[in-house]
Amino acid sequence: MQGLAKQIEEAAAVIRSRWSGTPKAGLILGTGLGGLAEQICNKTIIPYTEIPHFPMSTVQSHAGQLVCGELSGVPIVAMEGRFHFYEGYTMQQVTFPVRVMKALGADTLVVTNAAGGMNPHFDLADVVVIDDHINLMGDNPLRGINDDKLGPRFPDMCEPYSHKLNEIALQSALELGIAAHKGVFVAVAGPNLETRAEYRMLRGIGADVVGMSTVPEVIVAVHAGLKVLGFSIVTDICLPDALEPVDIQKILAVAATGGEKLSRLIPKVFDSLS
Ligand code: HPA
């Protein structure tokens, strides 16, 4: 077995030894959005430090543990705390858990993040169902030798986010009375927020929301053949001509409000999957 495939197997073996379920989906909980983990039933919690080859989470607002269990009766593995490129991890490290989710048997990845809203129709704490993305991180997790057993050299990107899952998510949001939009997510490396000129450019190239995560994980999910459903929560309004300094505490508070919406919405989407 090649290096990466071997590491994936070793990590998956440790998780299997602690949890006997087979996940239908993997879930990545973004900054301030960890509240959803509380809704997982029959939980087995595995700290990342106990999983071989998992990097360590350094962000304060991230717990750094894998929560295995059931959401709406659907077996899932959820990452409470993700790895960001801006923390200094390589793209391979950032996306390693997605490989492990696939190895455990997941066929779907649900990703969430806190993002800056550049579409003037979007409000604070609104839910955005990610329809497509733009990778401006300046790197790619698939760079280097391709292991054909993990996925193709040139993965197709015509539908990285499942249209079917997106429709289910938008319909579910409507039924729950949660404001949700479809949108294009652009990923930047961070960690600084954008200048006015950068927001203007990002909006100009077709993005509705901007953040510092998600795209690497989605690229690897597509490479691995997983269906993807992505959500952004608008945590700050990024209109270049009315820009205000961001306050990270405020972003986290807004993320908590948005997270509460996702903790109603995501289980409802899973209801339709089961
Ligand atoms: N830019 C980049 N990442 C972000 C932002 C933003 O405005 N808000 C939350 N994450």
Image: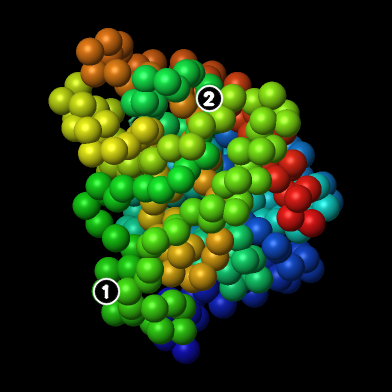
Q: Is residue 268 left or right of residue 130?
A: right
Residue ID at (59%, 73%): 103
Disc 2 secondary structure class: loop
- Specify the amino acid type for callout 1: Gly
Residue 221: image x %, image y %?
Answer: 48, 63
Given residues 94 and 130, the one toward you in this image is 130
Q: Which numbered dot is residue 144?
A: 1
Residue 227: image x %, image y %?
Answer: 56, 61
> Which residue appears farthest toward the bottom when viewing the image?
1
Picture quarter with ligand 1? top left
In whole angstroms, how far apart are the C-alphas of marks 1 and 2? 37 Å
Question: Which is closer to the viewer, label 1 or label 2?
Answer: 2
Say which residue label 2 marks.
126
Q: Is residue 72 left or right of residue 23?
A: right
Question: Upstream in the sequence, badge 1 or badge 2?
Answer: 2
- Specify the amino acid type for callout 2: Asp
Specify whether residue 30 is in view. no
Quadrant of the image containing the C terminus: bottom right
Q: Is residue 192 left or right of residue 219?
A: left
- Vertical arrangement, residue 269 with respect to residue 202, above or below: below
Q: Is residue 106 left or right of residue 115?
A: right
